[in-house]
Image (cartoon, coloured by chain):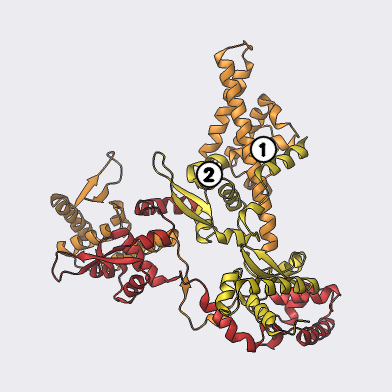
Chain colours: A red, B yellow, C orange
Amino acid sequence: MLEEALPNQILAILFVAKEPLTLSELQEVYPDTSVEELKGKLDSLVSKFNSFQQAVEIRQIGGGYRMTTRPHHHENIRTYLKTRPSAQLSLAALETLAVIAYKQPVTLPEIMDIRGIKGTSTIHTLLEKKLIETRGRKKVVGRPIMYGTTKQFIVHFGLNDLSELPTLEEFQEILSQSTG
Amino acid sequence: MLEEALPNQILAILFVAKEPLTLSELQEVYPDTSVEELKGKLDSLVSKFNSFQQAVEIRQIGGGYRMTTRPHHHENIRTYLKTRPSAQLSLAALETLAVIAYKQPVTLPEIMDIRGIKGTSTIHTLLEKKLIETRGRKKVVGRPIMYGTTKQFIVHFGLNDLSELPTLEEFQEILSQSTG
Amino acid sequence: MPDLAVPEGEGYTVQLDSFEGPLDLLLHLIRQQEIDIYQIPIAQITDQYLRYLEMMKDLNITIAGDFLVIAATLIHIKSGMLLPAQPGSELNEEVERSRQELVEQLLEHEKFKQAAQMLFERETVELCVWPPDESEFQAEEEELISANVFDLVSAFHRMAERYKDQIVMEMEGETVSLAEKLGEIRRLLKVQKEVLFSFFFQLKISRLHLAVTFMALLELTRLREVRLIQKDLFEDIRILAC
């Protein structure tokens, strides 16, 4: 349908463009072709593409051209995005997990002290994901609950045992070697 | 050409997917359709799509399906992307990565030995980009951390799995031919 | 400057960049002259290699220790090969072994250079075929990252750094009590296994603070909460939690 080379090249650029592609950007790629000619090619490309493509379309957005999925597919796309592996942690949860991994058994006041932030929500997330577990109570005032990492934690991070965690010293070594 | 609804829905998902789409992920979106049926639909979709689309193609990468531009457009695309900071790895980082890819699991001292350089390992960059990961510790003096490549590595270099990499012997042959 | 005509300025340094390590330099010298890697004329290559090092020195380029290690190996082989060959001589065999090891190291290194080149070419193409991102669908969700062990230790490191900053701020106040300083050092040692004594000087704090810091350290040593280690008279004192 689009045997000519230029339209396919433009399509490929439209496909990778993260922001709407403007005619002036396109002209920088093809400095020997005038803006008018490029506009003509682009418009005929867009109408051809949109008439035979049912999944994706090219729309004019924010002064440029952008390839997007057709809106009626959005429900399926959302379903797909939700089903992807939930092995993901928020940065806050990751920090809490790091403190627990390196300082276990450790209490909530101690965690908050090290993180310099108050809040308990990330503990619940980590407990739910079975990455941490309770480890009895500390024999100090208030007898706070202590937390430690689980076997699930070790599996999740691809370790054989806790001793395989890199130490802070090793991490600093890696950092200094990269910049050295 | 693809009047049926399902293929277009799958195309739309392939278009937005950041990572290669696996059959099991697809099955979660369509729980009423069997994996076999989905594979059949997907394969026929891929061959149809690839035969008429000249700008974009669907490739099997990292154990899943991924929509990418056809590689021969890469020069035009690079011209377009040029204004953005290059995300490409340094040659030093690529060398370290090559050693890790072919010798994994491998420790930092072993990497430095092969590269003949101490102290500029670029390990940190590779870890940050999630192209490599830690693989436990080696049972030798000092128990150094071992490194290996990730799934992200396979995807980053457009491979379906590690076995698609040329072997080290093949490089040897290329070298002996060039100096012959 | 030695008898070699060396182009001055950027051109030369750019050239040096490609010799990241000593093996790269050695390979360059060998390839440039189209020499068979198994038949390296050691004497000639050693001289050229050493001349390069001299040039680097003249240009005030710091020569990494790795370059000197290979230089020593080359000189060792070169001088060994000047000895009359005696069948079965231990020295001759040892020199030959060193030569073979060097050749093997070079061959191994070159294979990985090729592999790196292959990865470079693949990456060049692959970086330009990426599909657009799905950000328009993710705006509502919390930013998530899929974490590995490295993320974990980075997160921990970040927190330790954050702590350092807080301490700097606290020290901007004028008064400081021994109890406060004790608390600070204890917290610092909770996130770091070890603190260098010089760390407290880097903060450019007042003499009063330094005096109190010192007293606090003595107190913590007395309480056996910390150990102070100094390897040498002029070495930095390392403060370790017990």
Q: What is the crowding at mark 1: few (fewer than 14 residues within 10 Å), some, or many (at least 20)? A: some
Residue C135, disc: none
Q: Is residue C22 left or right of residue B73?
A: left
In the foreground, A115 or B6: B6
Residue A162 visible in the current orientation: yes
The amino acid beneath tag 1 is Leu
Asked if residue C128 shows in the view, the reply is no
Depth check, mark 1 against mark 2: the one in front is 2
**What kind of residue is marked 2?**
Ile
**Residue in the foreground of this view, choosing between C53 and C58:** C53
Give whichever of C51, A65 is nearer the camera: A65
**Which chain hosts label 1?**
C
- Structural distance between the alpha carbons of marks 1 and 2: 18 Å
- Residue C117 placement, left or right of A104: right
Q: Position of residue C95 (x, y in %)?
A: 58, 21
**What residue is shown with label 2?**
B111
Q: Position of residue A52 (x, y in %)?
A: 78, 84
Q: Secondary structure at mark 1?
A: helix
Image vertical order of residue C218 relative to residue C24, above or below:
below
Picture quarter containing residue B44? bottom right
Residue identifier under label 1:
C27
Task: Give the quadrant of the N terminus of chain B.
Answer: bottom right
B105, above or below A22, in the image: above
Kindly identify which chain the residue marked by label 2 belongs to: B
Q: Are marks 1 and 2 on the same chain?
A: no
* Residue at image location 23% in from the left, 62% down from the top: C184
Q: Give SS at disc 2.
A: helix
> Would you say A5 lies left or right of A59 here?
right
Q: Quadrant of the C terminus of chain B?
A: top right
Mark 1 touching mark 2, by CB under 8 A?
no
Quadrant of residue B50 in the image?
Answer: bottom right
